[in-house]
Image (spheres, helix red, strand yellow):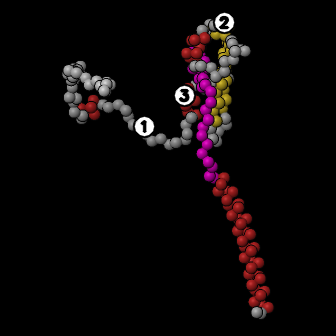
Amino acid sequence: MSDHYLRSTRLSLVLVACASLMACQSWSSTNKTLSGLVTPYKMDIVQGNFVSKEQVAAIQPGMSRTQVRNILGTPLLASMFHADRWDYVFTFVKQGLEPQSRKVTVYFKGDLLERIDADDLPSEAEFVASLDSGRKLGKVPVLEASEEDLKKFPAPANPAGQKAPLPAAPASYPPLEPAAR
């Protein structure tokens, strides 16, 4: 083999090796960019008792434990060491958003509500709006029919106010258990 042929073969191999290394580097950075765009689905995590601004406004000092429980629900934390204190803790973790955490503590004196300590709470409408998953919903159809729309349908076979006759009851029923042998 000629010296020229060996040199050109070596040069070709070196160029192919360099090109491969450069392609690997380029692939690695491209792969990192693509993996940053595609993220796995993470579930929303809701823990505890959601207490709204309206619920806290509905409870007043002097209410009984039962009345408070009917409005706020069962407390998340009710310790026997702090029998006169109920804690309502709520956390909400949603992908791409700052985790939310709220706490409401109610204090009793005997069986009556003494005071309430609460974080800044959203209204029920504000909370529901924060749950929006970003889906684009179509236009909501009108759910009422006009008199003209109702006239398009045939009248019911049994006009309102008249009850259809019930079928006659059978004279006898089959036994519930098989006969003894």
Q: Which amino acid does label 3 sit on?
A: Ala
Task: Point out the frontmost of discs 1 and 2.
Answer: 2
Q: What element carries label 1?
A: loop
Q: Which amino acid does label 1 sit on?
A: Val
Question: Looking at the image, is 59 positioned above or below residue 180?
Answer: above
Q: Report whether residue 165 is seen.
A: no
Q: What element carries label 2?
A: loop
How far is the residue under mark 3 from the one under mark 2?
A: 34 Å
The residue sitting at 55% across, 33% down in the picture is: 129
N-term mark: 1 or 3: 3
Q: Name the residue under label 3.
A: 125
How far is the residue under mark 1 from the one under mark 3?
A: 18 Å
Q: Name the residue under label 2.
A: 110
Instruction: From the top left corner, tell me how far across and down residue 167 is, in percent.
Output: 21, 23
- The span shown in magenta is 37-60
Q: Which amino acid does label 2 sit on?
A: Gly
Instruction: From the top left corner, tell me how far across and down residue 141 is, in percent.
Output: 39, 37
